[in-house]
Amino acid sequence: MSEITDNKVVSVHYTGTLPENGEIFDSSEGRDPLTFLVGHKQMIPGFEREMMGAKTGEKREFTLNSDDAYGDYAEDGVKELNVKDFPDGIEVGMTMAAQDEMGREMPFKILSIKDETVTVDFNHPLAGKSLTFNVEVVDIKDASEEEIAHGHAHGPGGHNH
């Protein structure tokens, strides 16, 4: 029976909750399973580590601290920007995205709007939080050479080119 190791394409059903209050922050319930290529930094660090060695049909529950999830909350991730750099109609609580110098999308949340400035937060919404996962392994297969070269799973639940 196959087990989770590097360069396996793994499909899982999962529910992620906040351990302090049980609030669900993400779940595959009612959707296709999450499919990813193990060992290629597609998942938060602790998720893959905790799933290593699991077999098809196995269920695991684990809690990750923020270091193994989305990192600590960084105060320097909060910036004040010029209100003129934003489109009309922005509101507190909206999530928008900017691009960094390399063209990567950087999502941020609007925290406050004053006369001349907009305060935004570039931290991941789950930064600084511990996360609990309930995971069931649905499928494990060997990755193709193409998937390994591309660094991600292809097909249903994975990436389509």
Image (spheres, grey):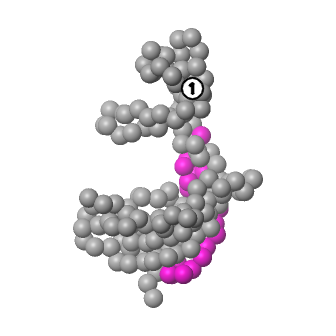
| Of the pair 89 and 161, the residue shown nearer to us | 89
Quadrant in the picture for the C terminus = bottom left
Residue plotted at (42% across, 58% down): 42
Q: Is residue 60 above or below residue 105?
A: below
Image x and y of residue 14, in percent: 57, 66
Question: In which quadrant will I find the N terminus?
Answer: bottom left
First to last magenta residue range? 54-73
Measured from the top left, where is residue 92 in percent x and y? Answer: 59, 27
Q: Is residue 152 visible?
A: no
Q: In which quarter of the view is residue 41 placed?
A: bottom left
Judge by depth and name the residue closer to the eye, 65 or 82: 82
Q: Quadrant of residue 9?
A: bottom left
Evaluate whether residue 61 shows in this view: yes
Q: Residue at x 32, y 73 (%)?
A: 143
| Residue that label 1 marks | 91
Taking the magenta stretch, the answer to whether it contains residue 65 is yes
Residue at horizontal 29%, vertical 67%?
147
On the picture, is 121 further left or further right than 17? left
Q: Position of residue 112 (x, y in %)?
A: 60, 23
Please name whichever residue, 16 or 77, is drawn nearer the observer in this view of the structure: 16
The amino acid type, in three-letter code, at marker 1 is Glu
**x then y, percent, for residue 51:** 53, 71
